[in-house]
Amino acid sequence: MVEDKMVSVVIPVYNEEESLPRLIDRLRPVMEGLKRPYEVVFVDDGSRDRSLELLKKTVDEWSQVKVVELTRNYGQHAAVFSGFSVSEGAIVVTMDADLQNPPEEIPKLLRAMEEGDYDVVGTVRRDRRDSLFRTLPSRVVNMIVRKMIKVDMKDWGCMLRAYRRDVVERMSACHEQSTFIPALAAYFAKRVTEIEVAHEERRAGVSHYSLRKLIDLQFDLVSSFSDFPLKLIMYAGIVMAVLGVSFGGVLGVARLVYGAKWAAEGVFTLFAVLFAFVGFQFFALGVMGEYIGRIYREVRRRPEFVIEKVYRAEKSPS
């Protein structure tokens, strides 16, 4: 049952035992200061440390907390969707558990949403405290998303965001195996805005986004909302075919004019061109394979996540 004034905060957790105590200590006074119904939904995404144990203890100490235990590690976006499935608030806020998203910024998101009657409130990380390894790919992702979604937002990578319940339900109804939640929300929302929020350094633990995961996330984004890579391969193939035929014609004429000796001296050029073509073919096969793999996963219709158990405070009998 959805309460009109309730706020749900969904937080995916994966091996964050060092950050959780600080997060809970900072989050609780913020939520109580809202002076409105709220709940906090922690999703344990198959953690291998003591994160789940700490979260279950929190349920006993904080009655507004729910803990969703997943059967294994499904990834951040699947974990968020599992949190959506048990949340009850009219407004749902998502944030990371590593405290790079300060919980003190949550009231600012709620004010922006309600004063402007927005469906989605995104955030821009002010004075971002990340390395160049994280910020440079983020800029590329932001540029690509703006082009594909046609929504002019500056920072698509920040997890601290607020969504209306109807947007959450529309996203949850998609049941996509690979998707990008901020872009999907913008696709379903009518009124979207973006505000600046503070950003903090990670003070404990390590980032779980390796280069491989960042690349996978990028391709999830592209493949979920665009067939541009396939079109790019087609157009590039046409251009390379035309260039190959033209180059072959030039070599044939040069052989007739300058003789066979000149043609033999250009053998390494031919090899270089051949290797370039072969490399492009393998790249093209890889891109098409990624699309086919995602189609295969969608056709199997396996669930995006499986909830082992939901822990919540026991209600006293009335």
Image (tube, grey):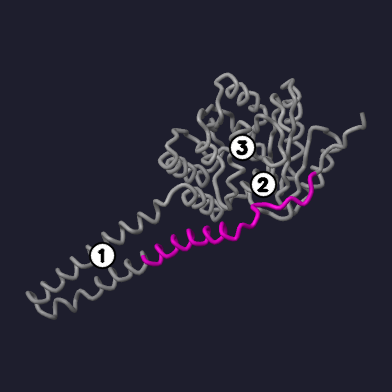
Q: Give the structural element (helix, strand or loop) at label 2.
A: helix
- Which span of residues is magenta-colored? 281-310
State the mark number for residue 241.
1
Cα distance between the residues tagged 3 and 2? 14 Å
Question: In this view, which residue lies farthest toward the left?
Answer: 257
Q: Tag 1's secondary structure?
A: helix
Task: Give the side of residue 24 with respect to residue 113, left or right.
Answer: right
Closer to the eye: label 3 or 2: 3
Kindly identify the residue that appears in the image at 82 percent across and 47 percent down: 53
The verdict on residue 283 being magenta is yes
Q: Which residue is mark 2?
A: 79
Image coordinates for residue 217, horizontal then vertical, percent: 53, 50
- Does 107 sit left or right of 275 as displayed? right
**Placement of 106 over or under 15, stated as above or below:** above
Amino acid, disc 1: Ala
- The CA distance from mark 1 to mark 3 is 46 Å
In the rendered view, tell whether residue 305 sits above or below residue 164: below
Earlier residue among tags 3 and 2: 2
**Left or right of residue 284: residue 189:** right
